[in-house]
Amino acid sequence: MAKVFSGIQPTGIIHIGNYLGAIKNWVELQEEHDCLFSIVDLHSLTVPYDPKGLGDRIKDALATNIAAGLDPEKATIFVQSMVPEHTELTWLLTTITPVGNLERMTQYKEKSEKQGLLSGLLCYPILMAADILLYKADLVPVGEDQIQHLELTRVIARKFNSTFGEYFPEPQPKLSKATRVMALNDPTSKMSKSIPGSYIALTDDPEEIRTKVKRAVTASDVEGEVSPGVANLFTLLEAFAPKDVYNKFAKDLEDGNLKFSELKPALAEAIVEELTPIREKRQELLAKPKFLEEVVAAGADRARREAKQHMQEIKELMGLNLTF
Ligand code: AQP
């Protein structure tokens, strides 16, 4: 059975980009694979954050993911910092990761421009490699923005295997259909938690969803071409609406009869229908902190058993088997 690992940062409200690019895929994969899903809190420390609110953001990410369909009975769900082997392996992997590869990462370049050159931001992809390799994962369901980091994970795995002996599989990405959902207010950049106005949150109520879809930018620079904003609305329509509704609007677009006054309300209603039960379930779960605590405690326990075993093997291969 293929081993799957993926994570989400508790950096803010989870949006439909995270949902379509990653979480929906996780929900499918948990049916047939050995899956580990982590709230990667250590990753979230690489951007400025409020320590007082971090606990609540972790709890919220957990409740939202379970509300969206993750099942603690089917997958191992845990918080990254509860398994210290992630940081231990990160250090070991830093010793074989060329700095040049890290400096080439697009996310590092973009984020360091905004917040300065911090080594945590530079080493973010090594922590991600450690998350994945610690469990010898084969498949990593992510959105397109994480593909470059995953390529680096494979480079690190190859370097380890050629230096210390064949041990890690080379993990492959598993992309969803909507692998890059674009920002509603600027469809040339990706929908992001940290860009206000760019996203529809899984917690938005029906009125907020309708307003956001109504305001979505659709303008085109070139007459006769499908603008990035319209393409993005069709990505969302395909993901959320029934097939016949999608087909009707796709035909309208092809025939030059597309009316935003029809498309936008139809899309908004399809999103409302899918997100309403998730929003309600999240509220129910947030009122049961004991249950959430038990889920992560059991998940961390399971993850740790495997992580400990693998760390012992990795350390032996690296000559760290301290028996005199
Ligand atoms: N716009 C997107 N379209 C498709 N997939 C996306 N993902 C993120 N944005 C989109 C995927 O969601 C998973 C979890 O992402 P994350 O929270 O770990 O980090 P991120 O990629 O940095 O997400 P954000 O929303 O852009 O957060 P901030 O603003 O904090 O940086 C990943 O699999 C990601 O690919």
Image (cartoon, helix red, strand yellow):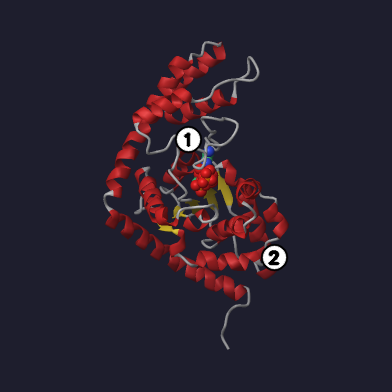
Q: Position of residue 134 (x, y in %)?
A: 53, 63
Q: Position of residue 311 (x, y in %)?
A: 53, 70
Does residue 3 appear in this view?
no
Mark 1 within 8 Å of ligand 1, using the beta carbon = yes
Circles 2 and 1, Cβ within 8 Å, touching? The answer is no
Q: Is residue 52 left or right of residue 87?
A: left
- The amino acid on which the numbered mark 2 sits, given as a three-letter code, is Ser
Q: Which residue is mark 1?
A: 199
Residue 162's label in the rendered image is 2
Residue 164's label in the rendered image is none
Q: Residue at x 66, y 49 (%)?
A: 105
Q: Residue at x 52, y 37 (%)?
A: 191
- Structural crowding at the residue carrying mark 1, measured as other residues with C-alpha within 10 Å and reported as few (<14), some (14–19) or many (≥20): many
In terms of secondary structure, where does tag 1 sit? loop
In terms of secondary structure, where does tag 2 sit? helix
Q: Quadrant of residue 128?
A: bottom right
Of badges 2 and 1, nearer the viewer stands 1
Q: Is residue 232 left or right of residue 36?
A: right
- The amino acid on which the numbered mark 1 sits, given as a three-letter code, is Tyr
What is the C-alpha distance between the residues marked 2 and 1? 43 Å
User: Could you say which is closer to the camera, residue 251 or residue 110?
Assistant: 110
Q: Residue at x 50, y 67 (%)?
A: 85
Q: Residue at x 41, y 56 (%)?
A: 52
The quarter of the rendered structure image containing the C terminus is bottom right
- Structural crowding at the residue carrying mark 2, measured as other residues with C-alpha within 10 Å and reported as few (<14), some (14–19) or many (≥20): few
Q: Position of residue 153 (x, y in %)?
A: 62, 56
- How many marks the image carries: the answer is 2
- Is residue 280 placed above or below 161 in the rendered structure? above
- Is residue 313 placed above or below 139 in the rendered structure? below
Q: Position of residue 65 (x, y in %)?
A: 39, 47
The answer to which of marks 2 and 1 sits earlier in the sequence is 2
- Is residue 215 placed above or below 177 in the rendered structure? above
